[in-house]
Amino acid sequence: MPFITYLLLWSIFAQVILTFTVLIKMRFVRMRAFKEAGVTMDEIAVNHNAWPDSVRKVQNNYINQFELPVLFYLACVMVFVFSVESWIFVVLAWLFVASRVVHMLVHTGKNRVKHRFRAFLFGFFCVMFQWIYIMFIATNAYLYSN
């Protein structure tokens, strides 16, 4: 396997690990809410607003892991399908993952919306540029191979 493919594959794994990390973190903050905040199963069975803010921040971040990252995953698959991995794409992939880590730390921490938005926007532009790359480079490679 070429090193560039290896690096791209590991950026995908890193994003998956981040998603699992947030899920595990959610388990711990929920357990703490049951013990310390007195949240009961009956309260949260049909109303997730019963959770304290500390839990809802992590829940919301977990949901975020299935929004923009879906476009990242698909872009990576497209690059593999067209066999057009490049250093530009790999750098954008790792920058995207780094932005998601920063986003998670801000979102589940002090939750400063301004900082969280900047991290999101940076990741958004990384994925957008990946898709522009695919639209132009990958489709041209496909057209010229036929």
Image (tube, grey):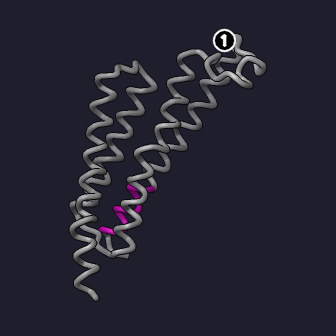
Q: Residue at x 30, y 43 (%)?
A: 124
Percent position (x, y) of residue 47? 67, 21
**Is 130 left, or right, of 110 in this rendering?**
left
- The residue lying furthest to the right in this view is 42
Q: Where is 64 relative to 137, above or below?
A: above
* In the rendered image, the vertical position of residue 136 relative to residue 128, given as above or below: below
Q: Position of residue 68 (x, y in %)?
A: 40, 45
| Residue at 34% in and 62% down | 7
- Choose between 69 and 4: the one closer to the eye: 69
Q: Secondary structure at mark 1?
A: helix
| Label 1 Cα neighbours within 10 Å, binned few <14 / some 14-19 / many ≥20 | few
Which residue sits at x=27%, y=51%?
128
Which stretch is magenta?
4-12
Q: Is residue 112 above or below residue 79?
A: above
Q: Image quarter for residue 90?
A: bottom left
The reply to whether the magenta stretch includes residue 10 is yes
Q: How many circles with numbers are drawn on the protein? A: 1
Q: Residue at x 76, y 21 (%)?
A: 41
Where residue 78 appears, as percent x and y from the top left, is 38, 67
Residue 116 position within the rendered picture, expressed as x and y whole percent measured from the top left: 34, 28
Identity of the residue furthest to the top in this view: 37
Is residue 101 highlighted in magenta?
no
User: Where, by quadrant of the figure, is residue 27 drawn?
Assistant: top right
Q: Amino acid at mark 1?
A: Glu
Quick one: quadrant of the C terminus? bottom left
State the image quarter where residue 130 is shown. bottom left
Q: Which residue is mark 1?
A: 36
The chief SS type of the magenta part is helix
- 63 displayed left or right of 105: right
Quadrant for the N terminus in the image = bottom left
